[in-house]
Amino acid sequence: MKTRVADTGSLTDGKGFCVKVGAAKLVLIKDGDSVRALENRCPHLGVPIGRGKIENGEITCPFHGSRFDIATGENRDWVSAIGGMKIPEWTSALLSFGKKPQALRSFAVTVEGADIFVDL
């Protein structure tokens, strides 16, 4: 279902914009001329990812350093930090708590004028 979630004036390059629409919690990301929408929930431990660092087409979980492609949600790195501080590779396996790398859920976005719609 196509749902209006925000307007383009709310977005800033390099920063996530968090919105809640019904039960869906999303992070919107301005990516050049495009807008991306991802679930605002890191699949590692379910913490919000919307305040994560955004650079080079990726968003990084601010809690455990997992990185995701902002266009597809694909996982690029799994549990590599704690609170923004890098951890040794061998520790990563312990902190993943047996969870396998997973993608962030992504949503199709349409921009009409200044209105941003997400297909929920």
Image (spheres, rainbow, N blue to C red):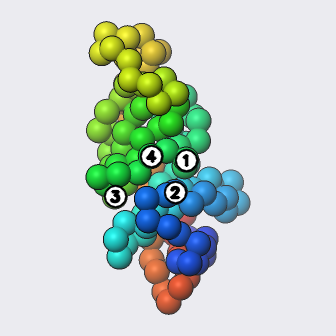
Q: Which residue is mark 4?
A: 53
Looking at the image, how many numbered discs can be counted on the residues? 4
Work out whether 38 lies above or below 53. Answer: below
Residue for point 32% across, 45% down? 74
**Residue at image coords 58%, 72%:** 10
Of marks 4 and 2, which one's residue comes earlier in the chain?
2
Q: Quick one: quadrant of the C terminus? A: bottom right
Q: Residues within 10 Å of mark 4 (few under 14, many from 20)?
A: some
Above or below for 106 versus 6: above
Q: Residue 44: x percent and y percent? A: 48, 29
- On the image, the x and y values in percent for residue 101 come to 36, 30
Q: Determine the CA span between mark 1 and mark 4.
A: 7 Å
Which element carries disc 4, helix, strand or loop?
A: strand
Which mark, by number, is residue 16? 2
How far is the residue under mark 4 from the one under mark 2?
Answer: 8 Å
- As measured in the structure, the alpha-carbon distance from the residue carrying label 2 to the one carrying label 3 is 13 Å
**Badges 2 and 1: C-beta atoms under 8 Å apart?**
yes
Q: Are the residues tagged 4 and 2 within 8 Å (C-beta)?
A: no
Q: Which residue type carries mark 3?
A: Ala
Q: Earlier in the sequence, mark 2 or mark 3?
A: 2
Question: Which residue is identified by label 1?
Answer: 51
Compare residues 88 and 100 and report the one nearer the observer: 88
> Up-down: is 105 above or below 85?
below
Give whichever of 96, 16 is nearer the camera. Answer: 16
Spatial CA distance of label 2 from label 1 is 6 Å
- Horizontal and vertical percent position of residue 27: 54, 56
